[in-house]
Image (tube, rainbow, N blue to C red):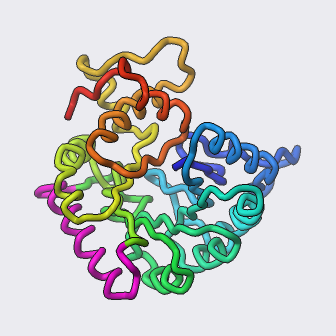
Amino acid sequence: MGILNLTPDSFSDGGRLAKKTGFEGPFQVDLDAAVRRAADLIRQGADIIDVGGESTRPGSEPVEPSEQIRRTEDVIRRLARLSDVPISIDTTSAEVSDRALSAGASIVNDISGGLFEPEILEVVRKFRAGICIGHIQGVPSRMQRAPHYDNAAEEVALFLRNRTGELLAAGIAPEQIVIDPGIGFGKTTAHNLEILARLDLLRDIGLPILIGLSRKRFLVDLADRDAFPKPPKELDEKRDFYTAIVTKRLMSEGIAIFRVHNVGYNRAAVEDPDFPDFPFL
């Protein structure tokens, strides 16, 4: 899953697809640049393009649905005309989901698992769309202040199991659902590692699993430890190396979808028998 952030403030690539206007004003997406970026992700081997108009990095504030729509709708419509690669909309908003699915998206990627706006489930049911239900403790603006679990792996798995049952009861078919433990969403580095070490709890739910840890801070925390392999000096974005190490390991654990910024690098790592292993699982 290739990430297409149409935002000014995403932690890794915010503002990179902004229209150059020559004066300060509201954030404007460069439609042509966004389409070129999506095409590049597809050339790298992306199976899904995940389009988002709202940053959910730690400390971020909500973005109004109208603004998310302004940023994403035309890009989705253009991409849907140009490519058959499925498009997902990264949002917790029912209104944004409805407009994105009408424009040509076919998947809703909701970090809250449909809890922030329960109406989103009716939108998914109406369009017979796919939905990725994520786990988050708190909300993005405050989620990393003091996350606490008695047992992170068990609590996250229980939430996703129960939430799956609620989606099925709402008329959403199991083949429409993907689960995401929400790495970094209201979780410390220790919590993230605990979840990744107990993926069997998620596999037991019986649905495809998505992992989204690309370039996240907890990878940098791990990379500071002596056991972590060192990235090649010529690599501009060191976090892609950290991401790819985990991607390769989790591919062998049966993870179905990896949400990443650098699709080509992660694909190459998976196929390289000499690429380093992740030392903490």
Residue 211: in magenta span:
no
How far across and how far down the image is residue 194, in percent? 18, 46
Residue 157: in magenta span:
yes
How far across and how far down the image is residue 61, in percent? 52, 61
6 is higher (above) or lower (below) than 269: below
Q: Residue at x 71, y 56 (%)?
A: 83
Q: Is residue 192 left or right of residue 65?
A: left
How far across and how far down the image is residue 25, in percent? 80, 55
Dominant secondary structure, magenta: helix
Span of residues in magenta: 148-174
Extreme right residue here?
A: 22
Q: Is residue 176 left or right of residue 49?
A: left
Q: Residue at x 33, y 25 (%)?
A: 223
Q: Residue at x 61, y 74 (%)?
A: 96
259 is higher (above) or lower (below) than 123: above
How far across and how far down the image is residue 212, in percent? 41, 49
Q: Residue at x 54, y 38 (%)?
A: 263
